[in-house]
Amino acid sequence: MAETMSLLLVSGTADKLMAGSIIASGGVANGMDVDIFVSFWGLMEMKKNAPPNMKLSYEGKDMADQIFAIMKEKKVPGWKEMLRQAKEIGTVRVYGCAMFADLLGLKKEDLDPMVDEIIGVSEFVSKAKESKMTLFI
Amino acid sequence: MTMSEEIKATKVIDARGSFCPGPLMELIRAYKEAKTGDVISVYSTDNGTKKDAPVWIKKSGNELVGIFDREGYIEIVMKKTR
């Protein structure tokens, strides 16, 4: 059985989401399965047809316009596209957080098709417990 | 002797302009579709790939044929051995 990497995505800013996608890509490149648990603002960005994310976390706020302009100019793929690519290459499972989904009345069909399932925190922790590494991004 | 004279790539991936981890992911995708014995070459302008791709090739138990500095890009060549 492949080793697993567990990622916890809570933030909804492009930098954090992109870091998650890139690390997930690194995981599948190393032959690992990747389990991603997405909650709060991360899950908000996983809503179906969410507009392109143009927010950066606090430290990068002042540079946001510049960073997004550079990324556009250099045709850097967005985090969703990168995550989709990682899913094509290896095993990446994306889990929506049941608590936050309930809070907002979100169902699996309200979320991007790359979300495989909505699960509770305990199920995620039980998976993370067996995994090789767990990262909170 | 240049690489192309030594060994002929079965598949060439032009990932120039793509950023880490793009070229490596394209290489892995091509690797999955390739047959044992196939030679895959990837062109990259990304410096991360220069380090990442050879590590992946060796770790995955395949053969790193070579890393070649071309004009304005690098070419990494692997042979699928497993």
Image: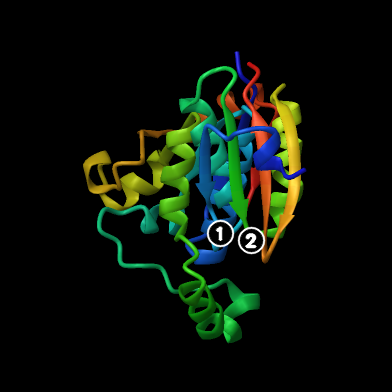
Label 1: which secondary element: loop
Is residue A133 placed above or below A53 in the rendered structure?
Answer: above
Chain on which label 2 sits? B
* Residue A93 in view: no
A50 displayed left or right of A63: left
* Residue B48 in view: yes
Q: Residues within 10 Å of mark 1 (few under 14, many from 20)?
A: some
Q: Which amino acid does the dot numbered 2 rest on?
A: Thr
Q: Which circle marks residue B45 in the picture?
A: 2
Q: Quick check: marks 2 and 1 in contact, CB under 8 Å?
A: yes
Place of residue A26 in the rendered image (x, y in percent of width and height, measured from the top left): 63, 42
Place of residue A102 in the rendered image (x, y in percent of width and height, measured from the top left): 32, 45
Q: Quadrant of the N terminus of chain A?
A: top right
Report the front residue among A89 and A116: A89
Q: Which amino acid does the dot numbered 1 rest on?
A: Arg
Is residue A59 placed above or below B71 in the rendered structure?
Answer: below
User: Counting residues from the N terminus, which is met first, the one under dot 2 or under dot 1?
Assistant: 1
The residue indicated by pointer 1 is: B16
Report the front residue among A92 and A61: A92
Discs 2 and 1 lie in a common subunit: yes
Q: Residues within 10 Å of mark 2 (few under 14, many from 20)?
A: many
Q: Tell me which residue sits at (61%, 76%) in the image.
A: A58
Label 2: which secondary element: loop
| Residue A98 found in image quarter | top left
